[in-house]
Image (cartoon, rainbow, N blue to C red):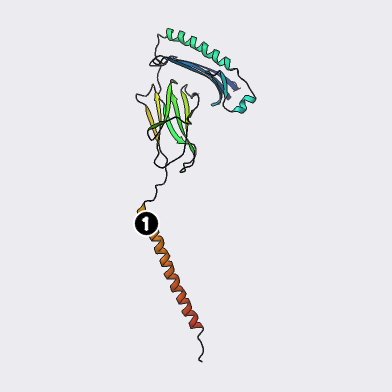
């Protein structure tokens, strides 16, 4: 496949189906390899990932030539030589050059991303939380995701997942931002992609109860004081009535 606007992409997906023939499929394991070039920026990248029923098992860090398991426990029961991933990407790079020549460098159909922002836990003031930017259904995989707090870019603590395969050969990706909900703060997840004419800003701000104004506090205090005074008056009246009734029931004799 060739990506549009000068972003060629080679994608190889190997499916291993385990189940009862073609009638019913029990599980699906996918090896997803891709290599891409951004001709405008003169950059290249690739990825090798194993997926089981939609969940990542591991991917290969091509820069460090290291196998990264989604959960460290997985590495105790299986192994994968990271160098195999590097070799696979090298082969894809060669195939991509051949495919681009055969297609006369034709461009593929670009699919813009869908973006959703939400918090990991219910938001409480000053309680540490994590914001999640979920970018879904985009192609090709060349994309930029950045966080803004009150309009200023934030980089501390930001973590991104690798690219994951979607249902229709598109990609999805998560970006995480640890934060402490503070009254007045707002956040934006900014996404840049070939399918967007301008960067997409997905706005988010915590839904916190409004602080009580001084007039409201004064009114509440006044109402509380009024209720207290009324209670005292009613209590005094009831005590006086009770004393009178007790005197009427027990009159004193003449001296």
For the residue pair 85 and 41, the one nearer the viewer reads as 41
Give the residue furthest to the front.
Answer: 156
Q: Of helix, strand and loop, which one carries label 1?
A: helix
Q: Mark 1 points at which residue?
A: 218
Can residue 22 be spotted in the picture?
Answer: no
Residue 219, given in percent of the width and then of the height, sits at: 37, 57
If the image is split into quadrants, where does the N terminus sit?
top left
Location of residue 231 by image quarter: bottom left
Residue found at x 45% / y 76%: 240
* Relative to 158, residue 125 above or below: below
Q: How many marks?
A: 1
For the residue pair 86 and 33, the one nearer the viewer reads as 86
Residue found at x 43% / y 7%: 101
Residue 163, given in percent of the width and then of the height, sits at: 49, 23
Location of residue 143 by image quarter: top left
For the residue pair 50 and 186, the one nearer the viewer reads as 186
* Relative to 213, residue 157 above or below: above
Residue found at x 45% / y 70%: 235
Can residue 144 be spotted in the picture?
Answer: yes
Residue 145, given in percent of the width and then of the height, sits at: 43, 27
Q: Rate crowding at label 1 as few (under 14), some (14 to 19) or many (20 or more) other CA atoms within 10 Å.
A: few
Residue 254, given in percent of the width and then of the height, sits at: 50, 91
* Relative to 238, residue 192 above or below: above
Give the residue furthest to the bottom.
Answer: 255
Residue found at x 45% / y 35%: 118
């Amino acid at each position: 496949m060739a990506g549009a606007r000068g972003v060629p992409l080679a994608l190889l997906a190997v499916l291993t189906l385990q189940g009862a023939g073609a009638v019913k499929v029990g599980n699906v394991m996918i090896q997803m390899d891709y290599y891409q070039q951004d001709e405008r920026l003169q950059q290249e990248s690739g990825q090798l990932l194993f997926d089981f029923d939609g969940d990542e098992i591991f991917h290969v860090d091509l820069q460090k030539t290291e196998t990264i398991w989604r959960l460290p426990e997985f590495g105790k029961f299986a192994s994968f030589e990271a160098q195999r991933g590097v070799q696979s990407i090298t082969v894809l790079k060669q195939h991509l050059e051949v495919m681009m020549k055969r297609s006369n460098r034709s461009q593929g159909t670009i699919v813009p991303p869908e973006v959703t922002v939400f918090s990991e836990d219910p938001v409480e003031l000053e309680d540490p939380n994590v914001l999640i930017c979920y970018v879904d259904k985009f192609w090709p995989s060349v994309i930029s995701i950045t966080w803004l707090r009150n309009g200023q870019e934030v980089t501390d603590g930001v973590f991104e997942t690798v690219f994951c395969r979607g249902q229709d050969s598109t990609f999805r990706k998560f970006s995480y931002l640890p934060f402490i909900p503070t009254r007045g703060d707002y956040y934006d997840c900014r996404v840049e992609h070939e399918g967007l004419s301008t960067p997409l800003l997905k706005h988010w701000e915590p839904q916190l109860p409004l602080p009580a104004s001084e007039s409201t506090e004064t009114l509440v205090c006044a109402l509380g004081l009024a209720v207290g005074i009324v209670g005292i008056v009613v209590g005094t009246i009831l005590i006086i009535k009770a004393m009178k009734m007790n005197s009427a029931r027990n009159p004193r004799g003449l001296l």
